[in-house]
């Protein structure tokens, strides 16, 4: 190839590359110029929905465009997530999800999308600790005592459904501590909590916001939190890791994702704009009742976390010999 030919080849190649990326760059430069739809794959009033509304109300102000929440609950979050996976990757359809997202390949192996490949992570809003609790009538004060209690004979634990955060937090603890137990799934948190408070079901691991009032009233005893660090809302309660059970932690995050082919400049802009409302004292105050802890991750770090969780969740299914339809 002569020098002149090589120069012409490089010029044409560069022009072709520029042409292929120009539409994405152009759309990123003018984004957003209309309302954004935020799909929440859970019902209105759920913890994720309320957290989303707190954060996205402030984000709307930041962007100068309304962010409209569209609740599409059902099938463990798959209905809403599937809509976003198939949406135009232009930054005008986003997904607000939770750690249930990385559970999908384990619990729903026939999901209509690829959890890792069909989405790009943007930012986490934070994480909410699950708390292992038991009725004071059982006379148990520590997690170690609970494990010994469960090893004597097979006990029961309540969840808000198969594959829920309450289910997964307990499976991770159960596997680490080496005890067997029978899951008693309920349609929602209130029924499950009522049965544990009454002592008809032995224990459970539930979201902090749901059980904190019962802990403060003395109707439930908090034994451990599932997060790697102690919760600011329960500073005297150890983590399951501190209690001596490795790999027993369960990080229940909530955050934003977009269709995988969304231009990187839009993802980066969304990430940067989200950091502003998350830092506002008023937003932090509204999220505090959920026990929401900051979880600062870049988009690439968040993507890496989700992929790591997918592998970990599949390993839990195999180790616990769990069966899902």
Image (spheres, rainbow, N blue to C red):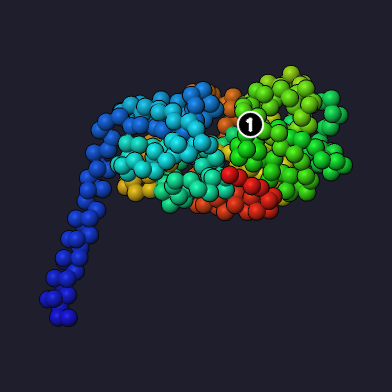
Q: Quadrant of the C terminus?
A: top right
Can residue 12 be seen in this snapshot?
A: yes
Q: Residue shown at 41%/48% (left/top)?
A: 118
Can residue 237 be seen in this snapshot?
A: no
Residue 15 vs 313, above or below: the answer is below
Q: Residue shown at 69%/43% (left/top)?
A: 171
Q: Quadrant of residue 99?
A: top right
User: As drawn, which residue projects farthest toward the left?
Assistant: 4
Q: How many marks?
A: 1
Front residue of 188/325: it is 325
Residue 10 vs 15, above or below: the answer is below
Report x, y in % for residue 147.
81, 41
Residue 184 vs 289, above or below: the answer is below
The reply, left or right, for residue 61 in relation to residue 134 is left
User: As drawn, which residue projects farthest toward the front?
Assistant: 325
Front residue of 253/59: it is 253
Instruction: Read off the residue under disc 1.
Output: 160
Q: Residue shown at 49%/26% (left/top)?
A: 43
User: As drawn, which residue projects farthest toward the bottom?
Assistant: 1
The reply, left or right, for residue 22 in relation to residue 177 is left
Which class describes the residues within 10 Å of circle 1: few (<14), some (14-19), or many (20+)?
many
Report x, y in % for residue 116.
47, 50
**SS for tag 1?**
loop
Report x, y in % for residue 283.
49, 26
The reply, left or right, for residue 88 in relation to residue 117 is left
Q: Quadrant of residue 70?
A: top left
Q: Residue shown at 84%/32% (left/top)?
A: 140
Report x, y in % for residue 103.
56, 44
Q: Quadrant of the N terminus?
A: bottom left
């Amino acid at each position: 190839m002569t020098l002149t030919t090589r120069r012409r080849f490089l010029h044409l190649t560069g022009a072709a590359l520029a042409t292929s990326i120009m539409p994405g760059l152009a759309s990123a430069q003018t984004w957003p110029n209309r309302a954004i739809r935020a799909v929440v794959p859970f019902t209105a009033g759920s913890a994720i929905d309320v957290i989303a509304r707190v954060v996205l109300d402030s984000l709307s102000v930041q962007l100068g465009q309304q962010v409209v929440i569209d609740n599409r609950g059902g099938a463990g979050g798959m209905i809403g997530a599937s809509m976003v996976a198939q949406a135009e990757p232009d930054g005008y359809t986003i997904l607000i999800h939770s750690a249930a997202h990385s559970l999908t390949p384990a619990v729903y192996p026939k999901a209509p999308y690829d959890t890792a490949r069909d989405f790009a992570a943007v930012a986490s809003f934070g994480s909410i600790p699950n708390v292992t609790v038991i009725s004071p009538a059982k006379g148990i004060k520590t997690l170690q005592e609970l494990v010994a209690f469960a090893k004597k004979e097979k006990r029961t634990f309540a969840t808000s459904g198969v594959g829920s955060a309450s289910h997964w937090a307990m499976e991770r603890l159960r596997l680490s501590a080496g005890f067997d137990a029978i899951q008693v799934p309920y349609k929602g948190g209130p029924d499950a909590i009522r049965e544990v408070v009454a002592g008809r079901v032995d224990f459970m691991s539930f979201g902090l916001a749901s059980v904190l009032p019962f802990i403060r009233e003395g109707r439930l005893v908090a034994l451990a939190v599932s997060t790697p660090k102690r919760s600011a809302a329960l500073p005297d309660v150890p983590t399951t890791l501190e209690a001596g059970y490795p790999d027993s932690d369960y990080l229940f995050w909530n955050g934003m994702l977009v269709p995988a082919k969304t231009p990187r400049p839009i993802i980066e802009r969304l990430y940067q704009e989200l950091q502003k409302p998350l830092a506002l004292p008023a937003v932090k105050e509204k999220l505090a009742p959920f026990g929401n802890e900051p979880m600062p991750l870049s988009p690439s770090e968040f993507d890496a976390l989700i992929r790591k969780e997918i592998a970990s969740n599949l390993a839990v299914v195999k180790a616990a010999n769990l069966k899902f339809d």
